Amino acid sequence: MAVAATVATISPASATSPAPAPLPQSKAFILVDVDTGNVISAGNDRTPLPPASLTKVITALASSNLDPATPVTIDARAAQAPADKIGLVAGQVWTADELFHALLISSANDAAFALAEQVGGSLPGFQQIFAHTAVELGMADHPVLMDPAGLDGTEGVDGGNLVSARDLAIAGRALLADPYLAAIVATPIYSFIGPGNVHHRLVSHNFAFLSTYAGAIGMKTGFTDRAGTSIMAAARRNGRTMLAVVMHSTNPTAAAKVLLDQGFGTAVASELTVDRLPAVDLAALRPPTVVTSESRQSTTPSSLAVAATVPDPAIAAVATAPQSITLLSAAAAVSFLLCLLLYTRHRRRVYRSRPSLWLERVAITPKE
């Protein structure tokens, strides 16, 4: 049963802002100017709440080191994820690109687990990357990130996740800065041929917003009984981009539209700077070497997971180990060549001093 929602209204950013408009019942909300990072309006935005599938925005960012062409072998855990799902089968090989589209467009839980295990090597490995991603993004409200799909309660991994509306806005702003992921969330319908020559037609769970709000560019909806219905919605008009996050609402799409309208109606000069989201640094989310099908071992966490858990001296030792092995191999090769050269010179001296040995060797050498 859904938790009872509280009534929220928009707090005006300044005296010159449009008149406050009532929102549908919502537990938390935030409106952010994506370009400046300024929080224009908010209510209960610093309280961690179950985010449901809004989690998948963070999962996509935590997996953004994957090359889209990377083949991903599906394991039993991903295949057995509860609905919504795209229908992954254990043993199948999908591309990361197909999984990213399933994750962000149709909110596929099985795709979330498949990406998590590919990047982290295991679910616990991905949880370390989850935590690292939250830190690097600048999330400040003590997010709890356990389940890559956003499941909670008895279905969620370790009880599920808790994330504030403000922290979700930080993640949403970062996703919009990633051209590849931003293009996916702006796609209302996506079709492709998957494994087994099966045709897939993904219709965005955010289709109602994308198809009815002028300038809509994404991004994600979410629902569980515990989290209620939520939305992260972004739009671009006249060179400005606004982002709204609405959590546990009776009508999140309508609430997001009210907030976005207020954002576009507020001049940049009128925006308060009391609260500004941290700057976006996508490079901080990525390991030094991009994880691809050639470099990833199925049982080894990615370099990002290692960087999040191993002390710096250990990382340095791991990084220099291949160089040490190469030097040892080179030394061994040089020693072998020196020994061979000395042996050859020795044999030549013997043959020169005793020519009969050469004749005997030729006589007993079999012909091919």
Image (cartoon, rainbow, N blue to C red):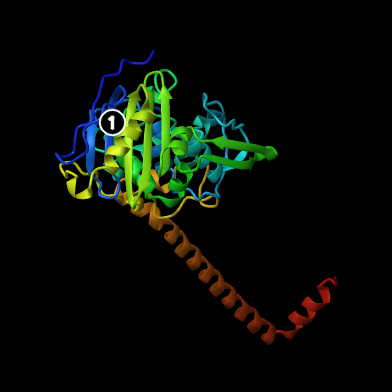
Residue at left offset 57%, top offset 77%: 342
- For label 1, the SS is strand
Residue 313 percent location from the top left of the image: 30, 51
User: In which quadrant is the C terminus drawn?
Assistant: bottom right
Residue closer to the observer: 335 or 90: 90
- Residue 267 visible to the viewer: yes
Residue type pointed to by label 1: Phe
Does residue 57 lie above or below 327 as drawn?
A: above
Left/right of residue 267 with respect to residue 218 in the rendered view: left
Residue closer to the observer: 321 or 126: 126
> Image quarter for residue 163?
top left
Left/right of residue 168 with respect to residue 14 in the rendered view: right
Residue 117 percent location from the top left of the image: 48, 37
Q: Residue furthest right?
A: 367
> Image quarter for residue 347?
bottom right
Residue at left offset 41%, top offset 42%: 216
How many discs mark residues in the rendered view?
A: 1
Mark 1, residues whose alpha carbon is within 10 Å: few (<14), some, or many (≥20)?
many
Does residue 14 lie above or below 83 as drawn?
A: below
Residue 251 percent location from the top left of the image: 37, 24
Which residue position holds label 1?
Answer: 29
User: In which quadrant is the N terminus drawn?
Assistant: top left
Does residue 214 lie above or below 179 as drawn?
A: above
Does residue 144 lie above or below 73 as drawn?
A: above
- Residue 124 visible to the viewer: no
Residue 255 percent location from the top left of the image: 33, 29
